[in-house]
Structures are given as C-alpha cells and as structure tokens.
Image (cartoon, rainbow, N blue to C red):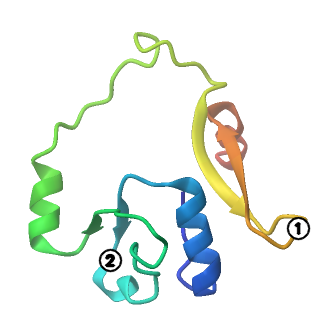
C-alpha cells in the first residue's frame, strides 16, 4: 500500500489501521512525516531503506522470482492496494489485479 507522506496524519493512520501491513518501508527523511505505528494502534516494524543495517538485513533475505504458475497465480490475483478519497470522506482501499497493472505500462 503506497503512503503519501504529504497526506494528513489522520488519513495515514487510518490507512495503516485499515490495511494492517506487516512492515512499513520508508526512508529516514520521510519517517518523521509518517504517523508512528503506535499512533495507529499497530505494532509494525519500520525498515528504513537508506539505513545501512536495515539494507543489510534486507539483502540477506532470499531473492528470487518464483514461477507464478507453480503457485497457482493468475492475472486476476491481487497486485496491490491503493487508497482513494472514498465517497464518505474516509479513504477507501481499492484492490488492483495484475491484469490491470498492464494499463499503466502501455
């Protein structure tokens, strides 16, 4: 779920609460603009992509591209979630399938 640090803190906190991410990836300069996970009522590990120790930890993780067919994945499976303004004034999560992503690549 992409988070825009220019959004109001309340909106970002709502998006974090609603999406319940397993980790928050950001950079040191952006961290202060994002609500603390504790403020959103969540215990989310924060990984700073530009911090050497976090970068080294991520580099140690296995990196490979599994064959989607072996996992039973198709173009209709979820690629990502993005939040819109929502008709009620509250952000609304929209699920986007892999087949829809190609529209951005043309």
As rendered, which of 18 and 70 lies closer to the eye? 18
Q: Are marks 2 and 1 in contact (CB under 8 Å)?
A: no
As rendered, which of 74 and 90 lies closer to the eye? 90
As rendered, which of 3 and 105 lies closer to the eye? 3
Q: Quadrant of residue 37?
A: bottom left
| Residue at x 23% of width, y 74% of height | 50
Q: CA distance from mark 2 to mark 1?
A: 31 Å
Residue 18 image offset from top left, x and y in percent:
60, 58
Q: Quadrant of residue 3?
A: bottom right
Q: Which residue is mark 2?
A: 27
As rendered, which of 59 and 33 lies closer to the eye? 33
Instruction: Classify 81 as above or below 87.
Output: above
Q: Which residue is mark 1?
A: 88
| Residue at x 78% of width, y 69% of height | 90
Under circle 2, the secondary element is loop
Q: Quadrant of residue 42?
A: bottom left
Under circle 1, the secondary element is loop
Q: Earlier in the sequence, mark 2 or mark 1?
A: 2
Residue 23 relative to residue 103: left or right = left
Q: Specify the farthest residue to the right.
A: 87
């Amino acid at each position: 779920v992409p988070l825009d640090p220019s959004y109001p803190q309340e909106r970002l906190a709502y998006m974090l609460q609603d999406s319940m991410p397993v980790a928050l990836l950001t950079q040191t300069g952006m961290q202060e603009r994002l609500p603390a996970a504790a403020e959103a009522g969540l215990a989310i590990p924060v990984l700073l992509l530009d911090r050497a120790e976090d970068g080294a930890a991520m580099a140690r993780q296995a990196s490979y591209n599994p064959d989607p067919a072996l996992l039973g994945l198709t173009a209709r499976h979820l690629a990502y979630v993005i939040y819109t303004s929502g008709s009620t004034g509250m952000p609304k999560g929209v699920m986007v399938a892999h087949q829809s992503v190609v529209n951005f690549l043309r």
